[in-house]
Image: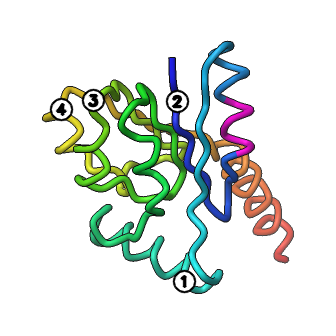
Amino acid sequence: MKALVIGDPLLSSERLETAVKKIMGDVEVARVDWKPASDEEFWFLRSEVEKKGPSAGRPPKEIFDHVGDVELIITHHTPINAEIVAAAKKCRIIGACRAGVENVDVATASKQGIAVFHTMGRNAHAVSDYAIGLMLAEMRNI
């Protein structure tokens, strides 16, 4: 199986590759990183994709060097727009390592028979820790 992992400033392609190989074993992995010019640009584009969908972002052109012959695409915040999905002729699965799939064109993927998954609850421990901390702070009038 061939996979494409697409990292970003928050989660590198190297870490995604390590996770994919740990879970799937012997898999050929191509890596691309989405690197906007600055942190400000990254946060702006990320916000635009959240509000307007994957067509609002500017994914790296290097994706097209690999996407045509992979069966699996794993991303974090990188926009996976209709153009990328259309070029992913052999792809069967697109995974977003986040709670939502706002950055993936799910409608186009579904039309091509590509399953899309996301990782609901990945921040559950951090949220529960924060909630307990807030309760303790409230009880102690902090």
The answer for how far apart the CA atoms under marks 1 and 2 are is 27 Å
Which one is in front, 138 or 69? Answer: 69
Q: Which mark is residue 1?
A: none
Q: How crowded is mark 4: few (under 14 residues within 10 Å), some or many (20 or more)?
A: some
Spatial CA distance of label 1 from label 3 is 30 Å
Q: Is residue 34 left or right of residue 39?
A: left
User: Which residue, given by chain and number where applicable, does mark 2 sit on?
Assistant: 3
Label whose residue precedes the other's in the sequence (2 or 3): 2
Compared to residue 123, the image places residue 26 above or below, namely: above
For label 1, the residue is 41
Sequence order check, earlier mark of 1 and 2? 2
Q: Quick one: SS at disc 2?
A: strand
Q: Do the residues labelled 3 and 4 touch (CB within 8 Å)?
A: yes
Residue carrying label 3: 114
Question: Around disc 3, counting alpha carbons within 10 Å, would you say few (fewer than 14), some (14 to 19), or many (20 or more)?
Answer: many
Residue at which label 4 appears: 112
